[in-house]
Image (cartoon, rainbow, N blue to C red):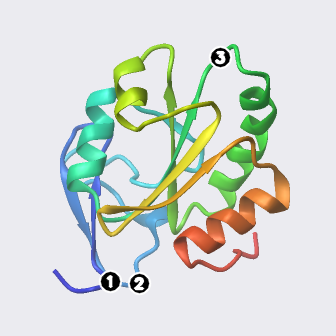
Amino acid sequence: MSATEQMIFCLSCGSTNRVGPGKSLSSARCGRCGKGLATPEPAEVTADQLVSLQSKDTGAFVLDVWAPWCGPCRMMAPHYEAAAAKFNGEVRFFKLNTDNHQTAAAQLQIRGVPTLIGWKGGRQVAHQAGAQTGRALETWIQTAFNVSSPTN
């Protein structure tokens, strides 16, 4: 596997896909089920899917650890959705509901929600507790993943 080639886990069927260097995630499709690999909208993940993402995926992705009762989580949600659409070609966006997946949240050592965690190259590269909105969220993503702001 080359330095810029990515292994991307498909949430739909559970297979791992090789995405070549320079290929935008927004055009990448799963070789097994044909579903798109990008997340133009944040995708809910289960604890099992999170384990697979952490162990098999080498692409860039953000996990929003949230709870439905959390006011700051609800406040951040539209900004997180906007970032998912904006960075669609380079970074994927996932959400983990702590009420439904308490053990997974504990394994991530979540102390409060919302918490953002970034992975790239198969390792955790960023961790941010507290709500991030607008430009601050975009800057966090750009810094965590060394990506520039798309023009869309």
Closest to the camera, between mark 2 and mark 1, is: 1
Q: Are marks 1 and 3 in contact (CB under 8 Å)?
A: no
Horizontal relation, residue 119 to residue 15: left or right: right
Which one is in front in this view, the residue at disc 1 or the one at disc 3? 3
| Camera-side residue of 84 and 23 | 84
For image coordinates 77% across by 46% down, the residue present is 79
Dot 1 or dot 3, earlier in sequence = 1
Question: At 76% across and 38% down in the image, what residue appears?
Answer: 76
Taking depth in this image into account, of 126 and 141 the one nearest to the observer is 126
- The label on residue 17 is none
Residue 50: give x, y in percent of width and height: 33, 38
Earlier-in-chain disc, 2 versus 1: 1
Which numbered disc flags the more N-terminal residue, 2 or 3? 2
Q: Which residue is mark 1?
A: 4
Q: Quadrant of the N terminus?
A: bottom left
Residue to which mark 2 is pinned? 22
Residue drawn 34% across the image and 21% down it: 103
Q: Residues within 10 Å of mark 2 (few under 14, many from 20)?
A: few
Residue at disc 2, secondary structure:
loop
Q: Residues within 10 Å of mark 1 (few under 14, many from 20)?
A: some
How many numbered discs, if any? 3
CA distance for labels 2 and 3: 37 Å
Tell me the crowding category of disc 3: few under 14, some 14 to 19, or many 20 or more residues within 10 angstroms, Cα based. Answer: few
Q: Which residue is mark 3?
A: 68
Residue in the picture at 75% in, 69% down: 152
